[in-house]
């Protein structure tokens, strides 16, 4: 059947705000998604306790190398593909359009899971701060609804305004982290300036797969540069530069800060619940160990209680910044899929004045509202269930997306050689990244029970099977949708992954 090429350049209602972001703005989006203060005070400290792995800080170094290998191919591909669908478009043009749709569905589940899961921790963090400092006592889900309303409003404004909001929040939280690092380096904890957390032999002990999941969760967001490629001033350069800057910045900051967390509490303390209780790192009522208290308590003891209060507030705003960043990522995936008719065409509509993907933003807001309501009504713990379950599911999904994208880069450049870019960035680096990331995915999947139960010797239960099955099931559903489109709507199928480009569709890579 002949390929239709009538659908040329996207109509204004299907076009994002062009030339709105430069390298600094894009870096703010990327790093804000990783939420430095949240990752360090929350994710890393909890990771030490859950996995029992005292060498987690070292793992940032090899993991950053793996991601740099991925970024080499990712950046090379960005020179040829400019699409808000990012992974979806890369896989579609590398491994085939049906595989691209399957990848898109995995991405939607992964990023929605990350975004919605963070609401649980945000609600508790903001609720605790406001109750302690302002005497305002609102249920965790009430703060979630307030944040959701603000994010819904920001989601339909110009993307550069979102970048400015994230820039302010990001700078403030990084300042807090640096002050903590300097204070602990100058005045170490009870075990001194120990380098246990940076010891490779220690890092391979404990639940390695679970530790790698926490490391991946810290980096999630770095790969989102391509999602904003259509809104960059110079996408061919901006995406590549922003990705490498983000990886390097995150790796250095998180390695040093993760190490100093163990110095503040002691490597043997931060991985032991009873030791945390004895050291005073507990929940406000003193009833349970709380590793997230290490940064605030240790920093406050050295710098002053004002620092602890400011850090607690910025911990909540750090979570808000991550919520906003992931919201924008999901909205653009929905936009890209609507523009190419994988989802209903209405999903491609943008706000006429700002160019923001208004339907994609509204869809993400509605889904988040529904999930928050379910957890609130059922009385589930917002941190141990909503946050822990969904963010770990999101991290697992992103690892899978990275592995698929690496394979897609290799396949693309095998068919479209680019000698001027060299074999390293087009074939060797992405091939190595694909193999290593696939191995990481397998190890994390095998240790998923540790992530869900917080017990290092926990047996596999139903939840540890159901959650990954949701992710993989989304991929299978996407493959089915792609296959149906191929047979029933070949005209639309032929344009998958092209971003509405005004050109005849190439043969399906598959």
Image (cartoon, rainbow, N blue to C red):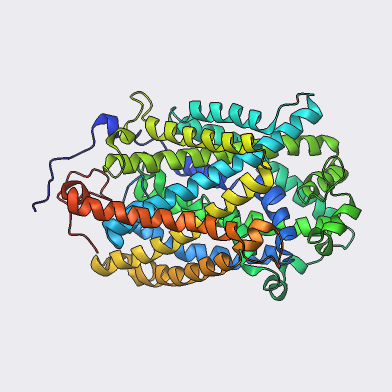
Position of 161 with respect to 464 (left or right) is left
Residue at 53% in and 30% down: 151
Q: How many marks?
A: 0
Q: Nearer the viewer, residue 83 or 99?
A: 99
Q: Nearer the viewer, residue 418 or 314?
A: 314
Q: Quadrant of residue 55?
A: bottom right
Quadrant in the picture for the C terminus: bottom left
Residue 42 screen position, x and y as percent: 70, 48
Quarter of the image where one finds residue 308: top right
Is residue 310 toward the left or the right of residue 228 in the image? Answer: right
- Residue 104, percent from left and from top: 37, 51
Q: Is residue 177 above or below residue 444?
A: above
Residue 25 visible in image: yes
Q: Is residue 422 above or below residue 90?
A: below
- Left or right, 248 with reference to 45: left
Residue shown at 35% from the left, 33% from the top: 17
Asked if residue 207 is positioned above or below residue 88 in the image, the reply reads below
User: Where residue 140 sits in the image (x, y, percent)?
Assistant: 68, 33
Picture residue at 52% right of the left edge, 35% below the top? 370
On screen, residue 211 versus residue 490, left or right, reads right
Residue drawn at the location 65% of the way across and 38% of the way down:
122
**Residue situated furthest bottom in the rendering:** 201
x, y (%) of residue 48?
73, 60
Res. 318 visible in picture: no
Nearest to the observer: residue 185 or residue 194: 194
């Amino acid at each position: 059947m002949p390929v239709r090429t009538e659908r040329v350049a996207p109509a204004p209602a299907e076009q994002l705000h062009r030339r709105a972001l430069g390298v600094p703005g894009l870096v703010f989006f990327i790093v804000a998604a990783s939420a430095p203060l949240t990752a360090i005070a929350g994710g890393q400290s909890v990771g030490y306790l859950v996995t029992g792995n005292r060498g987690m800080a070292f793992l940032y170094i090899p993991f950053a190398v793996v991601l740099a290998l991925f970024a080499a191919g990712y950046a090379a591909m960005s020179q040829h593909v400019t699409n808000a669908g990012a992974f979806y478009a890369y896989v579609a043009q590398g491994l085939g359009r049906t595989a691209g749709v399957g990848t898109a569905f995995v991405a939607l589940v992964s990023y929605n899971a990350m975004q919605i899961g963070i609401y649980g921790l945000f609600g508790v963090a903001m609720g605790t701060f406001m109750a302690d400092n302002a005497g305002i006592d609102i249920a965790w889900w009430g703060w979630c609804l307030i944040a959701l309303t603000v994010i819904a409003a920001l989601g339909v404004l110009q993307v550069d305004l979102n970048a400015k909001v994230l820039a302010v929040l990001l700078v403030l939280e990084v300042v807090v982290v640096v002050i903590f690092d300097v204070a602990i380096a100058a005045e170490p904890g009870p075990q001194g300036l120990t380098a246990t957390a940076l010891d490779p032999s220690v890092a391979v002990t404990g639940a390695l797969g679970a530790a790698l999941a926490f490391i991946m969760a810290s980096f999630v967001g770095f790969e989102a540069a391509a999602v904003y490629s259509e809104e960059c001033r110079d996408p061919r350069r901006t995406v590549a530069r922003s990705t490498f800057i983000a990886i390097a910045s995150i790796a250095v900051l998180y390695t040093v800060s993760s190490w100093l967390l163990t110095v503040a509490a002691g490597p043997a303390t931060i991985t032991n619940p009873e030791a945390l209780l004895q050291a005073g790192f507990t929940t406000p009522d003193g009833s349970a160990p709380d590793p997230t208290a290490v940064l605030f308590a240790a920093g406050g003891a050295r710098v002053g209680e004002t620092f602890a209060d400011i850090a607690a507030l910025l911990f909540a705003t750090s979570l808000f910044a991550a919520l906003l960043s992931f919201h924008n990522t999901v909205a653009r995936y929905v936009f890209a899929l609507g523009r190419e008719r994988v989802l209903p065409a209405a999903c491609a509509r943008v706000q006429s004045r700002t160019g923001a993907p208004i339907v994609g933003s509204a869809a993400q807001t509605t889904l988040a509202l529904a999930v928050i309501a379910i957890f609130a009504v059922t009385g589930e713990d917002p941190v141990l269930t909503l946050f822990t379950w969904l963010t770990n599911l999101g991290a697992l999904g992103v690892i899978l997306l990275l592995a698929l994208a690496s394979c897609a880069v290799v396949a693309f450049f095998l068919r479209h050689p680019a000698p001027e870019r060299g074999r390293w960035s087009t074939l060797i680096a992405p091939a190595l990244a694909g193999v290593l990331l696939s191995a990481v995915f397998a190890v994390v999947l095998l240790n998923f029970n540790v992530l869900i139960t917080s017990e290092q010797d926990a047996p596999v239960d139903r939840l540890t099977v159901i959650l990954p099955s949701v992710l993989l099931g989304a991929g299978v559903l996407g493959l089915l949708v792609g296959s149906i489109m191929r047979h029933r709507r070949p005209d639309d199928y032929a344009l998958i992954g092209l971003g509405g480009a005004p050109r005849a569709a190439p043969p399906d890579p598959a």
